[in-house]
Amino acid sequence: MTNRPHVATSAVVAVLAALTMLLASCSSGADAEVGQDGKVSVRYQGSASQVQWQELAESLGYFKKVKLEWVGDTTSGPQDIQAVATGAVDTGGAFNGSVAKLQQAGSKVTGVISVNGSDDQTFQGYYSLEGSGIETAQDLVGKTVGINTLGAYHEYAIKQWLHDQGLSDDDIKKVVLTVVPPINTEVALRQGQLQVGNLGTIFKDVALEKGGLHEIFRDTDLIGNLSIATQVFRDDYIKENPEVVEDYVQGVSRAIRWAQVHPREEVVNKYVEIIDARGRNENTNFVKKWKSPGIPVPGGVIKPEEFTVWVDEAVRLGELPAGIKVEDLYTNEFNPYANGTYPPDSNEDGV
C-alpha cells in the first residue's frame, strides 16, 4: 500500500468524527451509574496479553469510586478514542496527534493523563538491514517503510524526522509508507518486502537479538524522552462526573508513578499476576519483556510540548488549521502530581 495523500487522511477523520457525533447522540447519557457497591463502572477497551495503567491501578487498590468494566480489546488508538466519542466506552487512549485531529473534526473529548511514551529503555526504532546502504534520511527517498497504521504516530514520527533532517516536502512524499502488522515487520524486512521497518516493544527486542539490523533513528531522537499518547474522556462525561474522573485519574497517575519508582522485577511480577488472574487465555511473554514505563514525567502529567510538536507538524502538512490552542486539548486538573495534591516528584503515596 502506498502513502495516501494527507487530504484523504483528514477527510477520513472528518467522516469518522461525523459518524461518532451522530452515534453519540443516540447513546446513553453522560451520567455514570453507581453500582450496589457504591462504585461507578468505567468502561474501557484493553490490550490482549498486556496490562493497561488503569488495570494496574485497580489491582493496587488505588480507586475509591471507580470499578473498571472491560468491554473487549483494541489494537488501534484512533479506534479506541472514537469509541469514547460514540459513547461505546467511557475512556480510551491514542497518540496525541490523533486526539488533536479528532477534536478538531468536532468530537468533544479531552486528554486527562499521559499513558504511553518513549525513553532510553522503551522506544520505537526504525531499522534497515545491515549492508543495505540505507542509513540516512536521504536514503529513505523512494524506499518502502513499514508502519502499523497510516495517519497515526509512526507516520508523524517518520515525516517529522525526515523534515528535521532537511528533506524537502517533495522528497518526503516519495518515501512510501505501507501498513504491516508489528508481528510481521521483522520477517517482511528480512525478506526484502520492506527496506525499512518500525520495531518496538518485544518485537524489537527479539529482532535485535538475532542481529543483522541497522538502526536509522529512534523516536526519542525527535525531542528526547517524551509521552506520545493521552487517555481521554468525553467532555460531557467530565462535566457530569467530575468526581469519577478525578478518582480515575488519581488512580492511574499513582499506578504510573508506582511503576516509575519500583524495581522492574516487581512490576513484571505484578503484570504477570494480573494477566493470570483475569483468565482471558493470554500469555505473559510480552509483559516479561517489560523494561520501563516509557513515560518520563512523574505520574503521567501532560506537558504542552507533547502535543505542540505534533500539532505544529500537522499544520505544516495541511492536516490541521493554524491557531489551535494546545492547552484546550488536554487538562491536568485531575492529576494529583499537577494539582497540588502530591509534590511533583513524590512517590505513589505522595511521600
Image: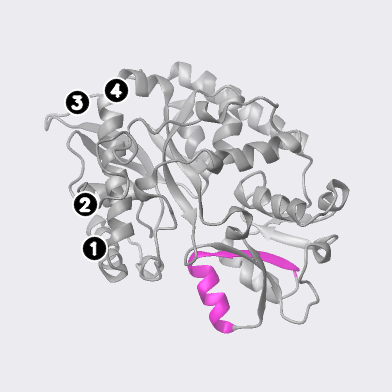
Circles 3 and 2, Cβ within 8 Å, touching? The answer is: no
Give x and y (percent) for residue 24.
47, 21
Circles 2 and 1, Cβ within 8 Å, touching? The answer is: yes
For this view, does 235 lie left or right of residue 1?
left
Kindly identify the amino acid type of the residue bearing the numbered disc 4. Answer: Asn
**What segment is highlighted magenta in the picture?**
193-210
Residue 2 to residue 250: above or below: below
Give x and y (percent) for residue 228.
52, 48
Q: Which residue is mark 4?
A: 241
Give the mark nearest the N terminus, 3 or 1: 3
Q: Is residue 28 visible?
A: no
Q: Which residue is mark 2?
A: 59
Give the mark nearest the N terminus, 2 or 1: 2
- Give the CA separation, mark 4 to mark 3: 11 Å
Circles 4 and 2, Cβ within 8 Å, touching? The answer is: no
Q: Which residue is mark 1?
A: 273
In terms of depth relative to the viewer, which is nearer, 29 or 112? 112
Give x and y (percent) for residue 253.
31, 45
Crowding around mark 4 (Cα neighbors within 10 Å: few <14, some 14 to 19, many 20+) is some
- Give the CA separation, mark 2 to mark 1: 9 Å
Give the mark nearest the N terminus, 4 or 3: 3
- Residue farthest to the left, as pictured: 37
- Give the CA separation, mark 4 to mark 2: 23 Å
Kindly identify the amino acid type of the residue bearing the numbered disc 2. Answer: Ser
Q: Nearer the viewer, mark 4 or mark 3?
A: 4
Crowding around mark 3 (Cα neighbors within 10 Å: few <14, some 14 to 19, many 20+) is few
Crowding around mark 2 (Cα neighbors within 10 Å: few <14, some 14 to 19, many 20+) is some
Q: Which residue is mark 3?
A: 34
At 31% across and 50% down in the image, what residue appears? 345
- Give the CA separation, mark 1 to mark 4: 31 Å
Give x and y (percent) for residue 283.
36, 66
Could you say which quadrant of the image residue 316 lies in? top right
